[in-house]
Amino acid sequence: MIPLLHDFTNETVLVVGGGSVGARKARRFAREAQVLVVSPSFADREFGDTELIRAAPAPEDVPDWLERTTPALVVAATDDAAINDAVVEAARERGLLVNRADRSGEREVGSVVVPATVREEPVTVAVATGGTAPAVSKYLREELEETLDGAGEMARVCAGLREDLKARDISAERRREIVTDVVNSPDLWTALRTGTSNCQQVIEDVLGEKLSTGGERP
């Protein structure tokens, strides 16, 4: 499987199934998409900012639900294999993305896996094991949470620095060298993680130092 990032802003995600798995999937997508959860009952769990629809669709009803809700992604998260089969089939017939939550390991062609994700905005790192070892994904996600501390600030520093260097007509090769030096600086990572330095301060410091010693002037 090829990992991709997909923007679901203003899109609809339909989750069929209101158990603990459906709740987890709903929370994952509710940060960005409009999420509809269809189920005859709902687990005593937080579903996030979602719309809960109390209904018990039979397999033959699933195509109609997809036609009515026009989702960009459908999640089959019930404990009924026949309903999940119907969700997958109906989604494929309509060319929709589909995630089947009751299968691990071998997946149907064209299926979507929702990975374990660590966010340090604007940095996102995802870990997946193809559904074979969720515990490994969870472990690695927790390890990465510490590693990524400060990555968001560093990304913002690099973005601002690249724009300033480009505005000063610094060559592309020199820009890459400067930004690479910044990213590889342990002291800077420490400063950003501890809050002893901020993005704009770093950019100004780097511009003052690198341009004065790099032999290239704006």
Image: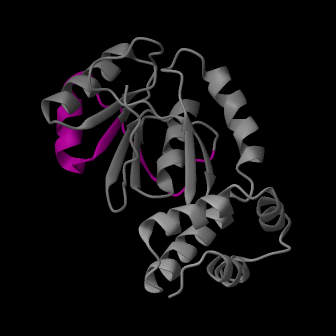
Looking at the image, is 206 positioned above or below residue 97?
below
The answer to which image quadrant residue 180 occupies is: bottom right
The residue at the point 43 percent across, 82 percent down is 169
Any part of residue 42 in sight: no
Looking at the image, is 40 positioned above or below residue 69?
above
The residue at the point 37 percent across, 48 percent down is 6
The answer to which image quadrant residue 9 occupies is: bottom left
The residue at the point 43 percent across, 68 percent down is 172
The residue at the point 48 percent across, 20 percent down is 130
**Extreme-left residue of the structure:** 93
- Residue 55 at x, y percent in the picture: 36, 38
- Residue 122 at x, y percent in the picture: 56, 61
Camera-nearest residue between 47 and 145: 145
Any part of residue 87 in sight: yes
Part of the protein shown in magenta: 46-74
Camera-nearest residue between 80 and 73: 73
Tell me if residue 60 is in the magenta stretch: yes
The answer to which image quadrant residue 191 occupies is: bottom right
Horizontal side of 48 relative to 108 (left or right) equals right
Horizontal side of 143 relative to 125 (left or right) equals right
